[in-house]
Amino acid sequence: MRRIIGTKKFYMTVLALAIPIMIQNGITNLLSLADNIMIGQVGTEQMSGVAIVNQLMFVFNVSIFGVISGAGIFGAQFWGEKNQDGVRYTFRFKIMASLLMTVLAIAVLWGFRTELISFYLKGSGDVGSIEETLTYGKQYLFIMLLGLLPFAISQTYASTLREGGKTLPPMIAALIAVVLNCTLNYVLIFGKFGLPVFGVRGAAIATVIARYVECTILTIWIHRNHEKHTFIERAYRSIYMPRDLVGHIFVKGTPLIVNEFLWSAGMATIMQCYSVRGLSVVAGMNISNTINNVFNIVFIALGNSVAIIVGQLLGAEKFEEAKDSAFKLMFFSFMSCVLVGAVMVVVAPFFPELYNTSTQIKELAKKFIVVAAVCMPLQALTHCTYFTLRSGGKTIITFIFDSFFVWTVAIPLAYCLTRFTGLSIVTVYFLCQATEAIKCVIGFILVKKGVWIQKIVQ
């Protein structure tokens, strides 16, 4: 049991890193939940249009995460090595790569907006409802594109701080932004204080304003406290990065970048498979995902803690301690999500009632939430194994473990079950989610073998 249960000091260290991330993500997701409920009060078509666009935005968000994480593997080990020059070089790489990714995303999302949104409108449904959903989705997307740049910059700054174990400043900036976002949503969606009713456009405007505020707060705070974060000093005086470091980032990071893009695109494709069963499934899944995101903060934060703790230990060449910490974190995350999943099951019958939509959609949402709750401990375990393998630079393995699995197992399964069987959509959803068990077994074996244990910075 000593191998999987840590000391009080160990858990205090983990929670010191994880709790600020949980608070940040929790507040963000709670207010996103409030925003989603507000849109849900306007109408099902508006809610579905926003949900579809947010699924596309999810691909961009996760791709940015992949770009940042590719360099972040090195950043965490540079922090462990106390090499601020190395941290500065990885920061520069993140900024440049994120800007390039943002320009590419805007071009694709706007250039193919009709085709991308219509991709989710292939199922059964009233023609008028489908056309309305498409219109609302376009309105929302047009404004949301303006917020991609500040999001990319904020993530670059926040990730660099987190790699050094500094999770409080990103939490504070996000807290201010999400409170502002929720307030503006209420005012703009419903037209309060004499303003016109903007509906879905109001939700997009509020999100974009909040993102610029978060970006401004975070960048100003870091630059004003540059003596504590010396990596930012002279960060913009040059674009110089050592050629060998850039080469290493590309070698280790490219599979990760491709993996995050393909994984997020895979999740969007699976959602499209579900959508062929009708617009009611899209709406029900949107309600379910909204509450799922609130509860998922536990294993997401603990996964980030794995990346930070294990990455720094590898950078300091404390290999046995790194392996020991990885197992303790995996067990802690799994058991935490058993408890969180139980709470979700209790919440499931009540949450969909907050939406102004049909009884059928509410019933679907309730069942989707229960399925997600049952499968959450499996997701927690795979999340920790993923970050453990990634911390040692084993990005080819994580690529196979993650996105390759999605495209060769999960997507074909979802495609065949939704199109060629008479199984209910809830049963299909459960079978697709349950494939995480396969990844759990593979991930545990790889972590136990220690194939990831190495220092990759010099």
Image (cartoon, rainbow, N blue to C red):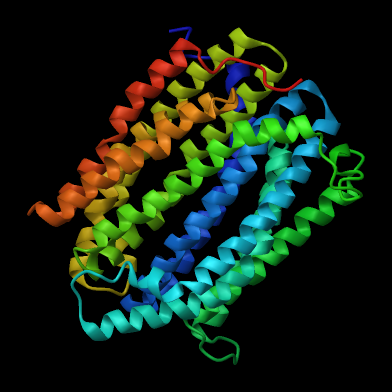
Indicate the position of residue 277 as horizontal and vertical percent values.
19, 63
Q: Is residue 365 visible?
A: no
Is 181 rendered above or below residue 328? below
Image quadrant holding the C terminus, namely top right
Is 159 rendered above or below residue 339? below
Image quadrant holding the N terminus, namely top left
Quarter of image, res 180? bottom right
Is 201 rendered above or below residue 5? below
Q: Is residue 428 visible?
A: yes
- The residue lying at 85 percent from left, 42 percent from top is 240
Is 128 rendered above or below residue 57? below
**Drawn side of residue 179 relative to residue 355, left or right:** right
Residue nearest the observer in this picture, 255 or 429:
255
**Drawn side of residue 72 relative to residue 192, left or right:** right
Name the residue furthest left. 422
- The residue lying at 39 percent from left, 16 percent from top is 445
Indicate the position of residue 247 as horizontal and vertical percent values.
70, 33
Q: How many numbered marks does the figure carry?
A: 0
Residue nearest the observer in this picture, 315 or 289:
315
- The residue lying at 27 percent from left, 82 percent from top is 129
Indicate the position of residue 45 as horizontal and vertical percent values.
33, 78
- The residue lying at 64 percent from left, 44 percent from top is 68
Indicate the position of residue 195 as horizontal and vertical percent values.
59, 90
